[in-house]
Amino acid sequence: MNPVLAQWVAVLSPLLAFAIALLLLPWLLGPGRRWMPVDHPNERSLHHTPTPRSGGVAVIAGTLVAALAVTPAWPIAAWIAAGTAALAALSLIDDFRGLPALVRLCAHLAVAALFLLFAPQVVHWPGGWIGVLAVPVAVLALGWAINLYNFMDGADGLSGGMTAIGFSALAAGFLRVGDTGGAALSAAVALSAVAFLRFNFHPARLFMGDVGAIPLGFLAGALGLIGFTAGYWPAWFPLLVFAPFCLDASITLGRRLLRGERIWQAHRQHYFQRLVRSGWTHRRTALAEYAAMTWGAAVALTALEVDRLAQGLLLALWLASALAALAWVDRRLPARRGE
């Protein structure tokens, strides 16, 4: 493809992703919903009516088409699309039949390893023992990112809105250095999530399901790693952009491990779940999480433009505000064993 034409196709791909997701979602809510699994409320749910899940099919479909459109201008997009499609297929099976936790985890790590080892544009591994250690560390980090979204996909509008904000920040980070392909693919994910949010914001008519949450975690981790290894941003940038996911899931999982709980079982101990249980509405909780996500993204993007001293001050300010917010939730409704 002509390079100029390839660039234009990449630039327009986010609109294509948005259109595909927006067209698929009404079908999923119409006669097409008969094939979809349904989340029935139970004692650990935050919703009160049976709600179809696997709406993430539309988000991932839009993203995959955009990734293929971006590939001529940004070849790594083909590898990202392959990993995304593999995880989506596995997760759709999980949505219907429920796969064992160990099978899911092994598959997630296998996809992460194959992506990092065989996608030639992703990582230029350093030589020596540092390079030997870098590969398994990166595989574990990407495997963790894959699961972050799944842990946090439990309240109306939460994952959809935070996806729109987080991937918009990644798109801005890529644009900052003139990487059109990375910016276009990130924007495509964000706009697909905006389309999904129309049907997922409270009261949700559709949930994302594993078929959406798992591949989105992979996309966040893969794009963040690509920007880091290319020298576009420091390692803290994608972590800060997706900090509400990273902190909530990591702290909650750590507490459950220390209490000897089965971390793969459903629970209601996440910070966003405790906000809803304490009396906050789904709408108020989602908007508060959006604010936290926007604050982290704004600090991250601003910190890229200043010197090291100013960066340190900004990051310290953000950390203080995040810890204060988490402590406030802990005081409002502490996490308890067995919940």
Image: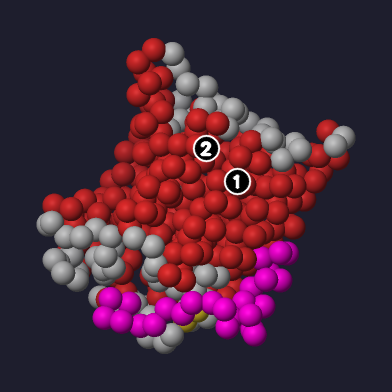
- What's the mark number on residue 115? 2
Q: Secondary structure at mark 1?
A: helix
Tag 2: amino acid: Phe
Mark 1 in CB contact with mark 2 (< 8 angstroms): yes
Q: Is residue 33 magenta?
A: yes
* Residue at (55, 31) in percent of width and height: 118
Question: Whole-percent x and y of residue 99?
Answer: 38, 62
- As measured in the structure, the alpha-carbon distance from the residue carrying label 1 to the one carrying label 2 is 9 Å
The residue where tag 1 is placed is: 82
* Residue at (19, 71) in percent of width and height: 339
Quarter occupied by residue 104: bottom left
Examine the rendered structure and indicate whether residue 277 appears above or below residue 311.
Answer: below
Let me know if residue 210 appears in the view: yes
Question: Whole-percent x and y of residue 131?
Answer: 41, 19
Q: Is residue 192 magenta?
A: no
Let me know if residue 328 appears in the view: no
Q: Which residues are magenta?
A: 19-45
Using a 10 Å C-alpha cutoff, classify the residue at mark 2 as few (fewer than 14 neighbours), some (14 to 19) or many (20 or more). Answer: many
* Residue at (37, 85) in percent of width and height: 48
Examine the rendered structure and indicate whether residue 79 appears above or below residue 63.
Answer: above
Quadrant of the drawing holding the N terminus = top right
Question: Whole-percent x and y of residue 13?
Answer: 74, 51
Q: Which sits earlier in the primary sequence, circle 1 or circle 2?
A: 1
Disc tally is 2
Q: Compare residues 93 and 242 and report the one nearer the observer.
A: 93
